[in-house]
Amino acid sequence: MLPKVVIFGRPNVGKSTLFNRLIKRKAAIVADIPGVTRDNKGLKANLGKLEFMLYDTAGFDEVNNKNELSKDITDKIKSIINIADIIIFMFDARSGIMPFDYSCASILRKIKCPILLVGNKVESETQKNQAYEAIKLGFGDPLIISAEHGIGFGTLEGNLSVLMKNINNFSEKNNIKDNNIRLAIVGRPNSGKSTLINTLMGKNIVLTGNQPGVTRDSVMIDFDWKGSNIQLIDTAGIRKKSKIIDKIEKLSVESSIDSVKYAQIVILVLDCNEALSRQDLAIASHVIEEGRVLIIAANKWDIVINKEEVRAALRNKLNKTLSQLKGVYLIEISALNKKGINNLMESAMSIYKKWNIKISTSKLNKWLNTIQQINPPPLKSGRVIKIKYCTQTSIRPPTFTFFSNLNGDFNDSYQRYLLNNIRDEFDLQGIPIRLIFKNSKNPFIHDL
């Protein structure tokens, strides 16, 4: 296993900025507002020749730990630092040492793992001199960095390297394989996404609550499902742009949409107590456009009264509005009461295999000849169109290229004919498919 490195400190010291720098993408929300991060987030990071699992944590604030949400946040911070191999204890050198920093230091003195004291936001000699005030915290001389500007990362790499040599579970980079299936859970606020994550994991991993907007960042969690390594991605609720007025919510929604790009399977969670909205369909359309596997989880199904009526209405609307994804999977679940979860995951793994399918050119062309005889392509400017051959040029999603004697795409109705027939012939219901049309000579003509 890779070493686990946890970034810890009071709110707004730059933990998420450092996290994004080391994983080399904006996976954590960053804003000049204390308390933006709520959930712990872990991803593989690289620093020079080092590779490790890096965890971003919420700002530790035991003083304002008054409501249930704040207590949950504090509990999750304490749980993640207890499994750390190395802790980066970060403070803001620009503002100097504060009482919260001493509270953080008191927590860390009870932890039995190496602590690396890091002073962030140092961009001048004055700030550098102020940073050494942190010696009072009792963890030796601080490392001086600027996460925003990438200053001091060579020293950070050197110190981490020394600490990692003493970790028993350290593995060389070349022995690590990234074969996780990335599964994102998306939907509108308060539809039950985080509850579904906690049900899958069998424990309260991510924050939940009755009020919308509890989840802000996209949270990645390693999960094993019957031998399959899965990285679950919990996302913030996605509302219409016109309803978003808060800066943090805007950043949260952007993070959720970005998570779809990095996922392979996307579960769209619907609240069955509410009508299927335009926003739900907009999210589904975005997933399809990205070419990802889409499964729709009809959540809170256990409290639906007229089940047959609701089921028929959902399926009818999906067929009409998502016609480009014929046969989209609709799974009825109750995340809170753990119903339908096995069916959901088995469907996800089944459709994931379809998404990776590779069909031989010979089978495709046998199919193509048959359907052209049944329904030949329409004339184009009075000329006969003949599709010479077809081949699969990509997977994930399956992409098929058709070569014909004329330039340009076929009309929409004939494209739908090809798409529906290829789904039926090769059992590709419920996955996105891309069709490409080209004018070219048959490269296999000499082999015929």
Image (cartoon, grey):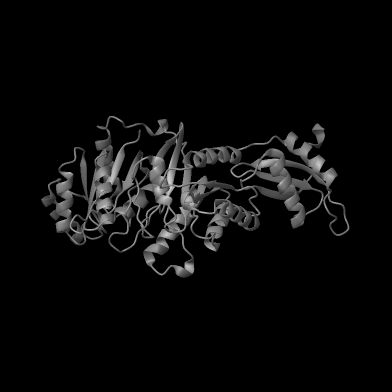
Viewer-side residue, 428 vs 89: 428
Q: Residue furthest right?
A: 382
Viewer-side residue, 287 vs 155: 287
- Left or right placement of residue 207 versus residue 78 in this view: right
User: Which quadrant holds residue 95?
Assistant: bottom left
**Number of numbered callouts drawn:** 0
Q: Position of residue 343 (x, y in %)?
A: 51, 40
User: Which quadrant holds residue 422?
Assistant: top right
Q: Position of residue 394 (x, y in %)?
A: 63, 42
- Left or right placement of residue 278 versus residue 155 in this view: right
Residue at image point 83% right, 54% down: 378
Does residue 317 show up? yes
Q: Position of residue 141 (x, y in %)?
A: 16, 47
Q: Is residue 215 above or below residue 202?
A: below
- Left or right placement of residue 169 versus residue 409 in this view: left
- Left or right placement of residue 190 versus residue 122 in this view: right
Q: Is residue 83 above or below residue 96?
A: above
Residue at image point 80% right, 32% down: 447
Does residue 24 show up? no
Q: Position of residue 236 (x, y in %)?
A: 41, 56
